[in-house]
């Protein structure tokens, strides 16, 4: 009888131990122990902090679209979000030096950068976009720019694009100057970065609108350390889920009044 009792207790202890190990494993995975994080339980992601409305400081605290996207990603992975800033010129070096786990700072995935880091699928799309005044219904596509006056930043890639579409291109020192002249009727159209145009429209209340699709596409993605496929996969799933359940669109419309993942 005593032997049976001891055997029963031993079996119970083994079962409890197994359950504890399994539960501990699950908890460990939830905290990201399989993701090669800088600090377990935290997801640190970097940005310049100087690119409103995507990432900037307000009352000393980091905020913006990038910050909210990164925070939502962290939540869905089961980690505490830790947004940090780093100078843009050395932000990739900081990732390689393991100062943070990822870059969520409106970085376009390019072949050159891909040699140093791994990129996720894009979390928003940008690129060259045509803007016209709100009341202009005569220009609905790039083909309509022929013979029209188009404003662009001087010595920019947008200028080259504009000159292929129109023989009347006017250079400006900044996007905002061109977009203000567009609203005033001094220009027929402006070609600039989609996000820059949307920000000017929303922040400055300019009565302008985007037309047609992107003239070129910038895939803005999350960068992680080269070889950290597990973290990249977790981030991709988080982004996919955000898109599917409407969370992404809610965040995007808060900052841009539109879904910036859509190509138009």
Image (spheres, rainbow, N blue to C red):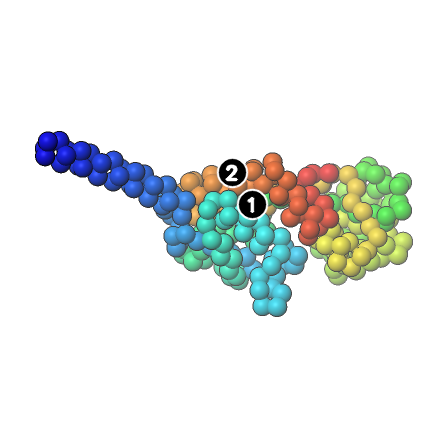
Q: Is residue 91 visible?
A: no
Task: Pick out the residue farthest to the bottom.
Answer: 59
The disc placed on residue 237 is: 2
Q: Position of residue 250 (x, y in %)?
A: 66, 45
State left or right for residue 212 relative to residue 18: right
Q: CA distance from mark 1 to mark 2?
A: 13 Å
Query: How many numbered discs sit on the rendered protein?
Result: 2
The residue positioned 42% from the left and 40% from the top of the image is 230
Which picture quadrant has residue 210? top right
Q: Is residue 239 above or below residue 173?
A: above
The residue positioned 43% from the left and 58% from the top of the image is 99
Residue ID for mark 1: 221
Q: Is residue 163 above or below residue 95?
A: above
Q: Is residue 179 above or below residue 219?
A: below
| Other-residue count near label 2 (Cα within 10 Å), few / some / many at <14 / 14–19 / ≥20 | some
User: Does dot 2 land on a helix, a strand or a loop?
Assistant: helix
Q: Position of residue 190 (x, y in %)?
A: 79, 50
Quadrant containing the C terminus is top right
């Amino acid at each position: 009888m005593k032997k049976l009792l001891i055997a029963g207790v031993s079996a119970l202890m083994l079962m409890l131990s197994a359950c504890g190990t399994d539960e501990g494993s699950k908890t460990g995975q939830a905290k990201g122990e399989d993701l090669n994080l800088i600090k377990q339980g935290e997801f640190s992601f970097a940005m310049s902090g100087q690119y409103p409305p995507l990432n900037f400081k307000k009352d000393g605290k980091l905020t913006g679209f990038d910050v909210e996207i990164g925070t939502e990603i962290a939540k869905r992975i089961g980690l505490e979000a830790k947004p940090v800033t780093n100078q843009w010129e050395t932000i990739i070096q900081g990732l390689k030096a393991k100062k943070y786990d990822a870059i969520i700072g409106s970085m376009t995935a390019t072949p050159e950068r891909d040699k140093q880091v791994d990129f996720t699928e894009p979390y928003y799309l940008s690129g060259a976009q045509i803007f016209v005044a709100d009341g202009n219904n005569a220009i609905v596509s790039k083909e309509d720019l022929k013979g029209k006056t188009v404003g662009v930043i001087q010595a920019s890639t947008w200028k080259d694009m504009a000159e292929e579409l129109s023989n009347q291109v006017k250079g400006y020192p900044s996007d905002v100057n061109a977009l203000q002249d567009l609203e005033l009727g001094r220009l027929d159209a402006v070609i600039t970065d989609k996000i820059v145009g949307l920000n000017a429209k929303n922040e400055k209340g300019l009565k302008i609108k985007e037309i047609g699709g992107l003239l070129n596409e910038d895939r803005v993605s999350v960068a992680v350390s080269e070889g950290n496929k597990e973290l990249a996969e977790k981030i991709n799933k988080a982004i996919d889920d955000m898109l599917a359940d409407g969370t992404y669109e809610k965040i995007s419309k808060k900052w841009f009044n539109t879904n910036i993942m859509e190509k138009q």
